[in-house]
Image (tube, rainbow, N blue to C red):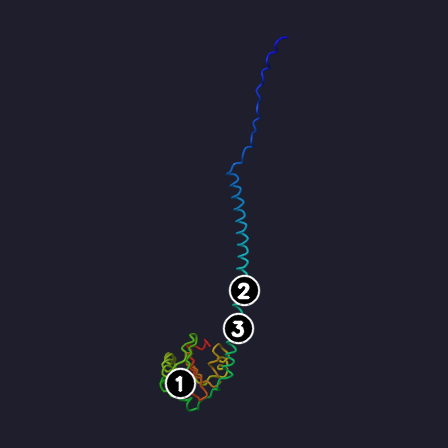
Amino acid sequence: MEPTEPTEEQPKISKVHVSPKPSQPWAVMLLALVLIAGAAYGAYWWRDKDAKKQIKQQSAQITELNQKVTKLEKDLADEKAKKDTTNATPAKAPSAEVLDNIKAAITSGNTAALEGYMASTVKVIIAASEGVGDRTPTQAISDLKYLDSATDPWNFALPAATLSEYQSGDYKQYFPTTALVGKAANNYVVSFSFNDSGKISGIFLSVNDDLL
């Protein structure tokens, strides 16, 4: 029996496991950043839209409140004026002699003579300026210098139609039925109002009756 040749054993080939190519880390990070940015923008857009809506609603509410306040202030002023008128002591026209003396003081320019006919406080009003306010008799006489540029003759017997026009204008409160009203040749106007004692308590002055 022939000897058997030894069989050469073939080397075993091991299978190499190939892992799939890993994803690039920067791509994942970029995608995450894009998603985060998108979410942030969406949230910002929503908040901005909501904020604008709230601002619009608040502006409308503020406008409505301001209108209500304005109306309330007007109603309060009207009510106060009505109350003051109701509670006011009726004015009393002075005697004819006193009225003549007041007219003479204006036509002559001797306004110092009026001090004795004035109340302790005289409200002086100048058309288109709304000045001057509460004055002492001395101050009120000084305020009458406003009439220095008025020219003669003065008319203290104005037609009823003219007085009615003054009494229906913007300064109607300064032309009560008991007032002494005079108009100069160059249209200056003066109106004297009296208190319940017949004393001068108000003086209204205007550079032109067109303002009335």
Q: Quadrant of residue 97?
A: bottom left
Q: Which mark is residue 33?
A: none
Looking at the picture, how far across and down is residue 83, in whole percent?
51, 81
Decide which of 162, 153 is in the foreground and name it.
162
- Dot 3 amino acid type: Leu
Q: CA distance from mark 2 to mark 3?
A: 16 Å
| Cβ–Cβ under 8 Å for marks 2 and 1 | no
Q: Residue 100, image x and y in percent?
A: 41, 89
Q: Is residue 59 above or below residue 207?
A: above
6 left or right of 148? right
Give the residue furthest to the front. Answer: 1
Looking at numbered disc 2 in the image, what kind of residue is underneath it?
Gln
Q: Which mark is residue 72?
A: 3
- Element marked by disc 2: helix
Question: How far apart are the alpha carbons under marks 2 and 1?
Answer: 49 Å
Q: Nearer the viewer, residue 3 or 161?
A: 3
Label number found at residue 120: 1
| Kind of residue at disc 1 | Ser
x, y percent for residue 34: 53, 44
x 40%, y 85%: residue: 120
**Which residue sits at x=53%, y=43%?**
32
Vertical position of residue 177 compared to residue 54: above or below: below
Which callout, 1 or 3, points at the residue further toward the start of the chain?
3
Residue in the foreground of this view, choosing between 20 and 38: 20
Q: Quadrant of the N terminus?
A: top right
